[in-house]
Amino acid sequence: MDKNTYCVIMAGGVGSRFWPMSRQQKPKQFIDILGTGETLLQSTWRRATAFCAPENIVVVGNEMYESLIREQLPNALPENILSEPLRRDTAPCVAYAAYKINLKNPDAVMAVIPSDHLISKEEEFTRVMNRAFEEARTGNKLLTLGIKPTRPDTGYGYIQFDVNGGELGDGKFKPVKTFTEKPNEELANAFVTSGEFVWNSGMFVWTASSILAAFEAFQPEIISLFKEKPDAFYTPAEKEFIAKVYTQCKSISIDYGIMEKADNVWVMGAELGWSDLGTWMSLYEQLPKTPGNNAIIGKNVMTFDTKTCLVNCPNEKLVVLGSLRNLIISEYDDMLLICKKDEEQKIKHYVNEIKLSKGEKFL
Protein backbone atom coordinates (compact mmCIF):
# COMPACT_ATOMS: atom_id res chain seq x y z
CA MET A 1 0.00 0.00 0.00
CA ASP A 2 1.05 3.59 -0.60
CA LYS A 3 3.10 4.82 2.35
CA ASN A 4 1.56 8.28 1.97
CA THR A 5 -2.03 7.05 2.43
CA TYR A 6 -3.54 7.64 5.88
CA CYS A 7 -6.94 7.14 7.46
CA VAL A 8 -8.30 9.00 10.48
CA ILE A 9 -11.16 7.32 12.35
CA MET A 10 -13.24 9.68 14.48
CA ALA A 11 -14.37 7.72 17.55
CA GLY A 12 -15.54 10.38 19.97
CA GLY A 13 -19.34 10.34 19.59
CA VAL A 14 -21.71 9.78 22.51
CA GLY A 15 -24.65 8.16 20.69
CA SER A 16 -27.35 9.18 23.18
CA ARG A 17 -30.17 8.30 20.74
CA PHE A 18 -29.26 4.62 21.24
CA TRP A 19 -29.83 4.61 24.98
CA PRO A 20 -29.86 2.25 26.85
CA MET A 21 -27.49 0.24 24.64
CA SER A 22 -25.23 3.23 24.05
CA ARG A 23 -24.08 4.95 27.25
CA GLN A 24 -21.53 7.59 28.17
CA GLN A 25 -19.01 5.01 29.38
CA LYS A 26 -19.47 2.85 26.27
CA PRO A 27 -21.05 4.61 23.26
CA LYS A 28 -22.38 2.79 20.22
CA GLN A 29 -19.07 2.69 18.31
CA PHE A 30 -17.72 0.33 20.97
CA ILE A 31 -20.73 -2.02 20.82
CA ASP A 32 -21.64 -4.90 18.51
CA ILE A 33 -24.86 -3.11 17.73
CA LEU A 34 -25.62 -5.19 14.61
CA GLY A 35 -24.96 -8.55 16.24
CA THR A 36 -22.17 -9.39 13.76
CA GLY A 37 -19.42 -10.26 16.24
CA GLU A 38 -17.64 -6.95 15.62
CA THR A 39 -18.14 -3.58 17.24
CA LEU A 40 -18.77 -0.67 14.87
CA LEU A 41 -15.26 0.62 15.57
CA GLN A 42 -13.72 -2.76 14.75
CA SER A 43 -15.63 -3.03 11.47
CA THR A 44 -14.55 0.52 10.56
CA TRP A 45 -10.90 -0.38 11.24
CA ARG A 46 -11.21 -3.55 9.16
CA ARG A 47 -12.67 -1.60 6.22
CA ALA A 48 -9.87 0.96 6.49
CA THR A 49 -7.16 -1.72 6.26
CA ALA A 50 -8.38 -2.53 2.74
CA PHE A 51 -6.93 0.76 1.46
CA CYS A 52 -4.55 1.88 4.21
CA ALA A 53 -1.69 0.17 6.05
CA PRO A 54 -2.53 -0.41 9.75
CA GLU A 55 0.44 1.68 10.87
CA ASN A 56 -1.09 4.65 9.00
CA ILE A 57 -4.51 4.43 10.65
CA VAL A 58 -5.09 7.09 13.31
CA VAL A 59 -7.97 6.90 15.80
CA VAL A 60 -9.19 10.03 17.60
CA GLY A 61 -11.48 9.79 20.61
CA ASN A 62 -12.17 11.23 24.02
CA GLU A 63 -9.54 10.25 26.58
CA MET A 64 -12.17 8.41 28.63
CA TYR A 65 -12.38 5.89 25.74
CA GLU A 66 -8.65 5.38 25.28
CA SER A 67 -8.61 2.02 27.07
CA LEU A 68 -11.62 0.83 25.02
CA ILE A 69 -9.89 1.83 21.79
CA ARG A 70 -6.69 0.02 22.79
CA GLU A 71 -8.65 -3.06 23.85
CA GLN A 72 -10.73 -3.24 20.66
CA LEU A 73 -7.93 -2.26 18.26
CA PRO A 74 -4.82 -4.10 19.50
CA ASN A 75 -3.04 -3.51 16.18
CA ALA A 76 -3.26 0.28 16.43
CA LEU A 77 0.06 1.96 17.14
CA PRO A 78 0.02 3.72 20.54
CA GLU A 79 1.22 6.95 18.92
CA ASN A 80 -1.75 6.76 16.54
CA ILE A 81 -4.40 6.78 19.27
CA LEU A 82 -5.10 10.47 19.83
CA SER A 83 -6.94 11.22 23.07
CA GLU A 84 -8.98 14.40 23.30
CA PRO A 85 -9.29 15.74 26.87
CA LEU A 86 -12.51 17.64 26.09
CA ARG A 87 -15.29 17.34 23.51
CA ARG A 88 -14.78 20.05 20.91
CA ASP A 89 -16.67 18.65 17.88
CA THR A 90 -15.01 17.52 14.66
CA ALA A 91 -12.92 20.50 13.47
CA PRO A 92 -10.37 20.36 16.34
CA CYS A 93 -10.31 16.57 15.96
CA VAL A 94 -9.37 16.88 12.27
CA ALA A 95 -6.88 19.67 12.97
CA TYR A 96 -5.12 17.57 15.62
CA ALA A 97 -4.84 14.50 13.39
CA ALA A 98 -3.88 16.42 10.24
CA TYR A 99 -1.21 18.48 11.98
CA LYS A 100 0.35 15.45 13.64
CA ILE A 101 0.30 13.38 10.44
CA ASN A 102 1.77 16.28 8.43
CA LEU A 103 4.68 16.61 10.87
CA LYS A 104 5.60 12.99 10.17
CA ASN A 105 4.79 12.92 6.46
CA PRO A 106 4.26 16.19 4.55
CA ASP A 107 3.19 14.15 1.50
CA ALA A 108 0.31 12.47 3.36
CA VAL A 109 -3.10 12.04 1.78
CA MET A 110 -5.70 11.30 4.44
CA ALA A 111 -9.25 10.05 4.69
CA VAL A 112 -11.43 11.07 7.63
CA ILE A 113 -14.26 8.67 8.46
CA PRO A 114 -16.68 8.18 11.37
CA SER A 115 -16.33 5.09 13.55
CA ASP A 116 -20.04 4.33 13.95
CA HIS A 117 -21.51 4.02 10.45
CA LEU A 118 -22.71 0.98 8.52
CA ILE A 119 -21.30 0.25 5.05
CA SER A 120 -22.58 -3.02 3.63
CA LYS A 121 -20.97 -2.75 0.15
CA GLU A 122 -17.40 -3.01 1.38
CA GLU A 123 -15.67 -3.78 -1.94
CA GLU A 124 -17.34 -0.74 -3.49
CA PHE A 125 -16.27 1.35 -0.51
CA THR A 126 -12.64 0.33 -1.07
CA ARG A 127 -12.90 1.21 -4.77
CA VAL A 128 -14.48 4.60 -4.02
CA MET A 129 -11.87 5.46 -1.40
CA ASN A 130 -9.00 4.56 -3.72
CA ARG A 131 -10.57 6.75 -6.41
CA ALA A 132 -10.88 9.60 -3.91
CA PHE A 133 -7.22 9.27 -2.87
CA GLU A 134 -6.25 9.37 -6.54
CA GLU A 135 -8.23 12.57 -7.06
CA ALA A 136 -6.99 14.24 -3.87
CA ARG A 137 -3.38 13.81 -5.01
CA THR A 138 -4.01 15.85 -8.17
CA GLY A 139 -4.36 19.22 -6.48
CA ASN A 140 -5.62 21.39 -3.67
CA LYS A 141 -9.08 19.83 -3.30
CA LEU A 142 -11.22 19.03 -0.27
CA LEU A 143 -13.21 15.94 -1.22
CA THR A 144 -16.30 14.51 0.43
CA LEU A 145 -18.41 11.44 -0.30
CA GLY A 146 -22.11 11.95 -0.97
CA ILE A 147 -24.72 9.20 -0.78
CA LYS A 148 -27.47 9.13 -3.41
CA PRO A 149 -30.74 9.73 -1.50
CA THR A 150 -33.30 6.94 -1.47
CA ARG A 151 -35.94 9.02 0.33
CA PRO A 152 -36.46 12.61 1.59
CA ASP A 153 -34.95 11.91 5.01
CA THR A 154 -35.01 14.89 7.39
CA GLY A 155 -32.39 13.35 9.68
CA TYR A 156 -29.48 13.72 7.26
CA GLY A 157 -27.45 16.65 6.02
CA TYR A 158 -27.59 17.39 2.27
CA ILE A 159 -24.93 18.53 -0.20
CA GLN A 160 -25.90 20.41 -3.35
CA PHE A 161 -23.52 19.95 -6.27
CA ASP A 162 -23.03 21.73 -9.58
CA VAL A 163 -25.00 19.75 -12.19
CA ASN A 164 -23.18 21.27 -15.18
CA GLY A 165 -21.64 18.52 -17.24
CA GLY A 166 -24.16 15.85 -16.34
CA GLU A 167 -25.08 13.72 -13.37
CA LEU A 168 -22.85 12.80 -10.48
CA GLY A 169 -21.79 9.52 -11.99
CA ASP A 170 -19.35 6.74 -11.24
CA GLY A 171 -15.96 8.06 -10.24
CA LYS A 172 -16.84 11.67 -10.99
CA PHE A 173 -16.37 14.63 -8.68
CA LYS A 174 -18.52 17.75 -8.83
CA PRO A 175 -18.00 21.17 -7.26
CA VAL A 176 -20.08 21.66 -4.13
CA LYS A 177 -22.53 24.58 -4.07
CA THR A 178 -24.22 24.35 -0.65
CA PHE A 179 -24.48 22.33 2.55
CA THR A 180 -27.83 22.04 4.36
CA GLU A 181 -28.13 20.39 7.76
CA LYS A 182 -31.31 18.36 8.46
CA PRO A 183 -33.93 20.18 6.35
CA ASN A 184 -37.66 20.07 7.03
CA GLU A 185 -39.82 17.60 5.13
CA GLU A 186 -40.85 20.05 2.40
CA LEU A 187 -37.26 21.04 1.71
CA ALA A 188 -36.02 17.45 1.81
CA ASN A 189 -38.63 16.49 -0.79
CA ALA A 190 -37.51 19.35 -3.02
CA PHE A 191 -33.87 18.33 -2.64
CA VAL A 192 -34.48 14.72 -3.65
CA THR A 193 -36.77 15.67 -6.55
CA SER A 194 -34.25 18.13 -7.98
CA GLY A 195 -31.51 15.53 -8.46
CA GLU A 196 -28.93 18.11 -7.36
CA PHE A 197 -28.43 16.85 -3.83
CA VAL A 198 -26.78 13.92 -2.06
CA TRP A 199 -26.72 12.95 1.58
CA ASN A 200 -23.71 14.16 3.54
CA SER A 201 -21.87 11.00 4.67
CA GLY A 202 -19.38 12.81 6.91
CA MET A 203 -16.48 11.12 5.06
CA PHE A 204 -13.66 13.20 3.59
CA VAL A 205 -10.41 12.80 1.66
CA TRP A 206 -7.69 15.45 1.17
CA THR A 207 -3.97 15.96 1.46
CA ALA A 208 -2.84 16.92 4.94
CA SER A 209 -1.37 20.12 3.50
CA SER A 210 -4.69 21.06 1.81
CA ILE A 211 -6.79 20.75 4.96
CA LEU A 212 -4.16 22.57 7.03
CA ALA A 213 -4.21 25.40 4.47
CA ALA A 214 -8.00 25.52 4.86
CA PHE A 215 -7.62 25.82 8.63
CA GLU A 216 -5.13 28.66 8.13
CA ALA A 217 -7.69 30.43 5.93
CA PHE A 218 -10.92 29.82 7.86
CA GLN A 219 -10.03 28.69 11.40
CA PRO A 220 -6.59 30.22 12.09
CA GLU A 221 -7.27 30.44 15.83
CA ILE A 222 -7.67 26.66 15.98
CA ILE A 223 -4.63 25.62 13.97
CA SER A 224 -2.41 28.23 15.64
CA LEU A 225 -2.92 26.44 18.96
CA PHE A 226 -1.54 23.16 17.59
CA LYS A 227 1.40 24.98 15.98
CA GLU A 228 2.60 26.49 19.25
CA LYS A 229 4.74 23.50 20.22
CA PRO A 230 5.47 21.16 17.28
CA ASP A 231 8.30 19.46 19.18
CA ALA A 232 5.78 18.08 21.69
CA PHE A 233 4.21 15.69 19.18
CA TYR A 234 5.37 12.07 19.20
CA THR A 235 6.87 12.61 22.68
CA PRO A 236 5.60 12.14 26.26
CA ALA A 237 4.97 15.91 26.33
CA GLU A 238 2.19 15.63 23.75
CA LYS A 239 -0.54 14.72 26.24
CA GLU A 240 0.06 17.74 28.47
CA PHE A 241 0.33 20.06 25.47
CA ILE A 242 -2.94 18.81 23.93
CA ALA A 243 -4.70 19.24 27.28
CA LYS A 244 -3.72 22.92 27.18
CA VAL A 245 -4.75 23.28 23.52
CA TYR A 246 -8.22 21.86 24.08
CA THR A 247 -8.98 24.17 27.00
CA GLN A 248 -8.45 27.10 24.61
CA CYS A 249 -9.95 25.56 21.48
CA LYS A 250 -13.49 26.42 20.40
CA SER A 251 -16.06 23.75 19.60
CA ILE A 252 -17.06 23.68 15.93
CA SER A 253 -17.78 21.04 13.29
CA ILE A 254 -15.56 20.49 10.26
CA ASP A 255 -18.59 21.08 8.02
CA TYR A 256 -19.44 24.46 9.48
CA GLY A 257 -15.87 25.50 10.26
CA ILE A 258 -14.25 24.58 6.93
CA MET A 259 -16.36 22.83 4.30
CA GLU A 260 -19.15 25.43 4.09
CA LYS A 261 -16.60 28.24 3.73
CA ALA A 262 -14.03 26.82 1.31
CA ASP A 263 -14.34 27.18 -2.48
CA ASN A 264 -12.32 24.06 -3.34
CA VAL A 265 -14.81 21.47 -2.06
CA TRP A 266 -15.83 18.64 -4.39
CA VAL A 267 -18.22 15.74 -3.88
CA MET A 268 -18.25 12.22 -5.28
CA GLY A 269 -21.48 10.25 -5.38
CA ALA A 270 -21.39 6.75 -3.96
CA GLU A 271 -23.78 3.87 -3.32
CA LEU A 272 -22.24 1.99 -0.42
CA GLY A 273 -25.15 0.42 1.45
CA TRP A 274 -24.57 3.28 3.89
CA SER A 275 -26.35 4.29 7.06
CA ASP A 276 -25.13 6.58 9.81
CA LEU A 277 -27.02 4.37 12.31
CA GLY A 278 -28.06 7.56 14.05
CA THR A 279 -31.36 6.25 15.43
CA TRP A 280 -33.10 3.04 16.44
CA MET A 281 -35.22 3.30 13.28
CA SER A 282 -32.13 3.44 11.06
CA LEU A 283 -30.95 0.26 12.79
CA TYR A 284 -34.37 -1.34 12.28
CA GLU A 285 -34.13 -0.64 8.55
CA GLN A 286 -30.77 -2.40 8.27
CA LEU A 287 -31.51 -5.57 10.24
CA PRO A 288 -33.05 -8.73 8.74
CA LYS A 289 -36.75 -9.16 9.47
CA THR A 290 -38.80 -12.07 10.79
CA PRO A 291 -42.08 -13.13 9.14
CA GLY A 292 -43.82 -10.65 11.46
CA ASN A 293 -41.50 -7.90 10.17
CA ASN A 294 -39.73 -7.72 13.52
CA ALA A 295 -36.00 -6.94 13.74
CA ILE A 296 -34.50 -8.94 16.60
CA ILE A 297 -31.09 -8.91 18.27
CA GLY A 298 -31.03 -11.63 20.92
CA LYS A 299 -30.95 -15.42 20.66
CA ASN A 300 -33.82 -16.18 23.05
CA VAL A 301 -36.59 -13.83 21.92
CA MET A 302 -39.98 -15.45 21.32
CA THR A 303 -42.79 -13.50 19.65
CA PHE A 304 -46.51 -14.22 19.48
CA ASP A 305 -48.74 -12.05 17.33
CA THR A 306 -46.05 -9.35 17.53
CA LYS A 307 -45.28 -7.27 14.45
CA THR A 308 -42.94 -4.52 13.23
CA CYS A 309 -41.04 -4.29 16.51
CA LEU A 310 -37.33 -3.71 17.08
CA VAL A 311 -36.09 -5.94 19.90
CA ASN A 312 -32.60 -5.79 21.37
CA CYS A 313 -32.03 -8.02 24.40
CA PRO A 314 -29.14 -10.02 25.91
CA ASN A 315 -28.57 -13.45 24.36
CA GLU A 316 -28.81 -15.19 27.72
CA LYS A 317 -32.23 -13.75 28.58
CA LEU A 318 -35.50 -15.39 27.53
CA VAL A 319 -37.84 -12.66 26.29
CA VAL A 320 -41.47 -13.45 25.45
CA LEU A 321 -43.50 -10.83 23.57
CA GLY A 322 -47.20 -11.16 22.89
CA SER A 323 -49.63 -9.05 20.83
CA LEU A 324 -47.33 -6.04 20.43
CA ARG A 325 -47.03 -3.57 17.55
CA ASN A 326 -44.51 -0.99 16.41
CA LEU A 327 -42.35 -0.84 19.52
CA ILE A 328 -38.68 -0.39 20.36
CA ILE A 329 -37.76 -2.81 23.16
CA SER A 330 -34.19 -2.65 24.38
CA GLU A 331 -32.63 -4.08 27.52
CA TYR A 332 -29.02 -3.45 28.48
CA ASP A 333 -27.44 -4.09 31.87
CA ASP A 334 -29.94 -2.86 34.48
CA MET A 335 -32.04 -0.74 32.09
CA LEU A 336 -35.08 -1.40 29.95
CA LEU A 337 -36.56 0.88 27.30
CA ILE A 338 -39.99 0.36 25.75
CA CYS A 339 -41.37 3.06 23.48
CA LYS A 340 -43.26 3.53 20.22
CA LYS A 341 -41.10 3.41 17.11
CA ASP A 342 -42.64 6.59 15.74
CA GLU A 343 -41.80 8.43 18.97
CA GLU A 344 -38.12 7.53 19.15
CA GLN A 345 -37.20 11.22 18.89
CA LYS A 346 -38.35 11.46 22.51
CA ILE A 347 -35.52 9.20 23.70
CA LYS A 348 -33.14 12.15 24.07
CA HIS A 349 -35.78 13.81 26.25
CA TYR A 350 -36.07 10.64 28.33
CA VAL A 351 -32.30 10.59 28.80
CA ASN A 352 -32.33 14.22 29.97
CA GLU A 353 -35.08 13.45 32.47
CA ILE A 354 -33.20 10.40 33.73
CA LYS A 355 -30.16 12.59 34.35
CA LEU A 356 -32.25 15.07 36.34
CA SER A 357 -34.09 12.53 38.45
CA LYS A 358 -31.62 9.61 38.70
CA GLY A 359 -28.22 11.23 38.17
CA GLU A 360 -25.44 9.82 36.00
CA LYS A 361 -25.79 6.20 37.11
CA PHE A 362 -28.01 5.12 34.23
CA LEU A 363 -26.41 7.25 31.49
Image (spheres, rainbow, N blue to C red):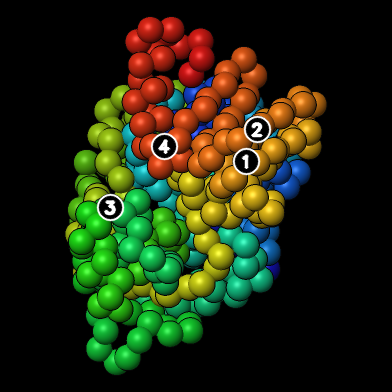
The image quarter containing residue 168 is bottom left
Q: Is residue 325 above or below residue 164?
A: above
Which residue position holds label 4? 344
Q: CA distance from mark 2 to mark 4?
A: 21 Å
| Label 1 residue SS | loop
Camera-side mark, 2 or 4: 2
Camera-side mark, 2 or 3: 2
Q: Position of residue 139 (x, y in %)?
A: 37, 76
Q: Earlier in the sequence, mark 3 or mark 1?
A: 3
Side of 241 where 263 appears, left or right: left
Which residue position holds label 2? 322
The image quarter containing residue 354 is top left
The residue lying toward the viewer, choosing from 232 and 99, is 99
Amino acid type at image mark 4: Glu
Amino acid type at image mark 3: Lys
The residue lying toward the viewer, choosing from 235 and 149, is 149
Amino acid type at image mark 2: Gly
Which residue position holds label 3? 182
| Label 2 residue SS | strand
Q: Earlier in the sequence, mark 2 or mark 1?
A: 1
